[in-house]
Amino acid sequence: NAGVMQNPRHLVRRRGQEARLRCSPMKGHSHVYWYRQLPEEGLKFMVYLQKENIIDESGMPKERFSAEFPKEGPSILRIQQVVRGDSAAYFCASSPGATGRNEKLFFGSGTQLSVL
Amino acid sequence: KQEVTQIPAALSVPEGENLVLNCSFTDSAIYNLQWFRQDPGKGLTSLLLIQSSQREQTSGRLNASLDKSSGRSTLYIAASQPGDSATYLCAVQRMDSSYKLIFGSGTRLLVRP
């Protein structure tokens, strides 16, 4: 029973390139969450998706960032025209249903994005 | 706005010592508080979850307490071991949007052999 799988583990991009981060939730989980961790900071919520729907993207920068969770396949976090400030660890989490009281999120190992 | 603060930012102790990590939050309208462990290059592992109606939770050598009225939680680690070296994060689950965990910046713990 694999956990939340994220790939790649490390991604290096030059300024102006695109970064695509992938997340496969745990088996049976249909809710996905993306968090970003900047150096020396805590994780910050970015976006919450269900299959084919964005539920809440209030934590995501308005420009250059987008996320999707298609009917088939992993969730994708896409960052266009990356800048050095995008360098961070990006974590994905999943849950079987909508998190309510006391329901845990299960986190992946993260993707470390480095922008040169 | 909910803010979560963890002190100290870093801690180094000799093996065998008992230690306490602190977490404070500004808004008491929470469902629960969780303590996570983060190892370099790895994901987060949930250690303990304390519901808002509870005062503490225990798992092995770990004990977490919650005082919602004062906005504080502590993680107590008994008889620390080098394998406990990691970053410990606390996070609160808000009542108004329960899928948004609000994390502290973490405490980096080093247990010296």
Image (cartoon, rainbow, N blue to C red):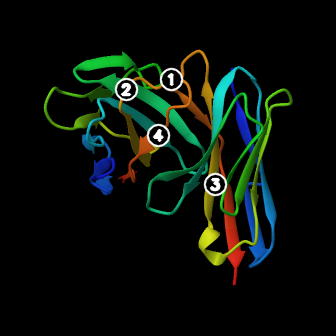
> Do tag 3 and tag 1 residues touch (Cβ < 8 Å)?
no
Q: Which residue is mark 2?
A: A97
Q: Which residue is mark 1?
A: A100
Q: Which residue is mark 4?
A: A36
Residue B65 x %, y %: 77, 44
Cα separation between marks 3 and 2: 26 Å
> Badge 3: few (under 14), some or many (20 or more) residues near its Cα, within 10 Å?
many
The chain ID associated with circle 3 is B
* In the image, residue B39 above or below residue A41: below
Q: Is residue B80 left or right of residue A13?
A: right
Amino acid carrying label 4: it is: Arg
Q: Which residue is mark 3?
A: B88
> Do tag 2 and tag 1 residues touch (Cβ < 8 Å)?
yes
Q: Secondary structure at mark 3?
A: strand
The chain ID associated with circle 1 is A
Residue B8 x %, y %: 78, 54
Q: Of B94 and A17, which appears nearest the observer?
A: B94
Residue at the extreme left of the image, as rendered? A72
The chain ID associated with circle 2 is A
Q: Is residue B14 left or right of residue A14?
A: right
Sequence-first disc among 2 and 4? 4
Residue B82 x %, y %: 64, 77
Amino acid carrying label 1: it is: Gly
Amino acid carrying label 2: it is: Gly
Residue drawn 15% across the image and 26% down it? A71
